[in-house]
Amino acid sequence: MSDARLHLVPVRSREAKDFVRAWHRHHPPPAGQIFAVGAADESGTLRAVAIVGRPVARHFDDGATLEVTRTASDGTRNANSLLYGASWRAAKALGYRRLITFTQEGESGTSLRGAGWTLIARRPPRAGWHTVSRPRTGHGNDHVARFLWQAPAPTPEVPNALPPAQSNGPE
């Protein structure tokens, strides 16, 4: 896709999930979400979406962490980087302190690095979630190594280095 000039647009849940169904390479839309954001070109055509929700893994679900559970793009350059950055700004504005996402083996992570994210862990392939006592169907990521990424740490607020000027009365 060309180097279209992109801007952020609000995206309703149904529209984001429909976009994921149409464009995501290996996963269906996630079940839930906290918010979604889109990238559109100059004509208003939606080119990419990001869906952000509670972390899938329960040990990350601490009330202060969100996860980008899906991004999908029609191939427009820089769309995913734009959305990863916007997702982090939105999560911080909502009071969250951490934003994570996973990529699969074979995905470069270029969009994440472009948005300032850091690779923090490698997860080996797993056999799947199915057990005799709790039957489950695969979701397309069984037997695939995964990589955990984290958005840049929020910059702490720096207190004013100089004390306020003292007033000795009218000048």
Image: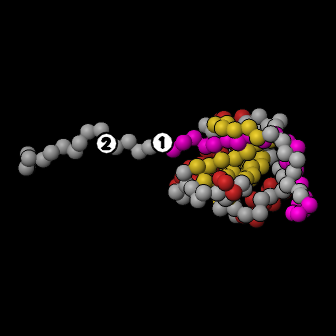
Q: Tell me the residue that label 1 is attached to.
A: 155
Task: Give the camera-side residue of 22 and 94.
Answer: 94
For the residue marked with disc 1, what is the amino acid? Answer: Thr
In the rendered image, the residue lying farthest to the front is 133
Tell me the tag on residue 160.
Answer: 2
Instruction: Say which residue appears at 34% left-offset and 43% top-offset.
Output: 159
Mark 2 packing: few (<14 Cα in 10 Å), some, or many (20+)?
Answer: few
Q: Position of residue 64 (x, y in %)?
A: 57, 56
Task: Give the camera-side residue of 62 and 39.
Answer: 62
Image quarter where the N terminus lies is top right
**28 with respect to 153 (left or right):** right
Task: Indicate yes or no whether the magenta region holds residue 18.
Answer: no
Mark 1 packing: few (<14 Cα in 10 Å), some, or many (20+)?
Answer: few
Instruction: Say which residue appears at 87% left-offset and 63% top-offset.
Output: 134
Q: How many marks?
A: 2
Q: Secondary structure at mark 1?
A: loop
Which quadrant of the figure has residue 10?
bottom right
Q: Position of residue 120 (x, y in %)?
A: 66, 38
**Mark closest to the chain's N terminus, 1 or 2:** 1
Which quadrant of the figure has residue 52?
bottom right
Q: Secondary structure at mark 2?
A: loop
Instruction: Say which residue appears at 64% left-offset and 57% top-offset.
Output: 61
Tell me if residue 114 comes above or below residue 42 in the rendering: above
**Region of the chain picked out in magenta, as a range:** 132-155
